């Protein structure tokens, strides 16, 4: 009888998930500690397809956070570190330029608004001007957590399963090699980030791997370009530092 009562109590838990489409069948294995979600999280679309899954430590994501489209294909892969988030908070509170180990801390001190593009969860899943509410699969995902520090593999996918962009975050900022496809899937960029800024050569390729253009950056600042083909397409926001 005690087992049955406990099971019923667990099954009666209802979660609130601020995500796209309505989720009447959403359930989870979270425990509430200090009014913050803590533990394993899973939620489902109304058709039974898994929507998102991951782990939370007192409201902060930790490890891999996976989001799927309604058709079952992966939409987002994010990797977070709760320990790195705590380190970031400590460095912010005791800020001293010679006593910090994370570049995101310096960025927060120099430009709080820009730093929040990386630490506010909604900004890491969608372009800020498109982060509006809605229940359509084509609209952006709204995570249930508010903040987090990315640290590890990062990827976005088109609904057909094709990769949109992929790379690595380190201590909250993009780092090392990244590959980014254009929305029409006709071209892709390949280049490096250093402490969240584009650095050195960024190369534009066609879908057939033909080199089209080279852009050169230094610490996020665009310096020059070289076109490798006579007819070169115009690519939106190609010199952006984000």
Image: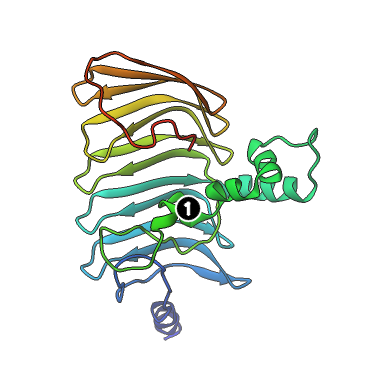
Residue 80: give x, y in percent of width and height. 51, 47
At 37% across and 67% down in the image, what residue appears?
Answer: 133
Residue labelled with disc 1: 123
Element type at mark 1: helix
Q: Is residue 154 left or right of residue 62?
A: left
Most foreground residue, 64 or 2:
64
Does any portion of residue 3 appear in the rendered image?
Answer: yes
Q: How is the image coloured?
A: rainbow
Residue 239: give x, y in percent of width and height. 43, 30
Marks counted in the figure total 1
- Vertical placement of 118 versus 35: above or below? above
At 34% across and 54% down in the image, what residue appears?
Answer: 67
Task: Give residue 99's quadrant in the image.
Answer: top right
In the rendered image, the quadrant that contains the N terminus is bottom left
Most foreground residue, 8 or 58:
58
Does any portion of residue 200 appear in the rendered image?
Answer: no
Residue 225: give x, y in percent of width and height. 40, 18
Q: Residues within 10 Å of mark 1 (few under 14, many from 20)?
A: some
At 43% across and 62% down in the image, what residue appears?
Answer: 41
- Vertical placement of 216 versus 93: above or below? above
Residue 184: give x, y in percent of width and height. 21, 39
């Amino acid at each position: 009888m005690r087992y049955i009562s406990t099971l019923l109590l667990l099954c009666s838990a209802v979660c609130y998930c601020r995500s796209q489409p309505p989720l009447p069948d959403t359930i989870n294995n979270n425990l509430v500690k200090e009014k913050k979600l803590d533990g394993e999280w899973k939620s489902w679309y109304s058709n039974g397809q898994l929507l998102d899954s991951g782990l939370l430590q007192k409201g902060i994501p930790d490890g891999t956070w996976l989001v799927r489209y309604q058709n079952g294909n992966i939409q987002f892969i994010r990797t977070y570190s709760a320990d790195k988030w705590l380190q970031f908070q400590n460095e912010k509170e005791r800020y001293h330029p010679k006593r910090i180990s994370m570049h995101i801390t310096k960025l927060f001190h120099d430009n709080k608004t820009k730093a929040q593009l990386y630490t506010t969860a909604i900004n890491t899943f969608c372009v800020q001007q498109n982060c509006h509410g809605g229940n359509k699969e084509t609209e952006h995902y709204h995570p249930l957590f508010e903040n987090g520090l990315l640290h590890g593999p990062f990827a976005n996918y088109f609904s057909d399963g094709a990769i949109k962009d992929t790379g690595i975050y380190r201590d909250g900022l993009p780092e090392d090699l990244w590959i980014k496809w254009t929305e029409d899937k006709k071209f892709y960029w390949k280049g490096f980030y250093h402490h969240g800024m584009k650095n050195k050569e960024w190369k534009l390729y066609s879908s057939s791997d033909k080199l089209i253009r080279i852009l050169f950056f230094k610490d996020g600042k665009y310096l020059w370009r070289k076109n490798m083909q006579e007819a070169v397409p115009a690519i939106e926001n190609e010199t952006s530092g984000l």
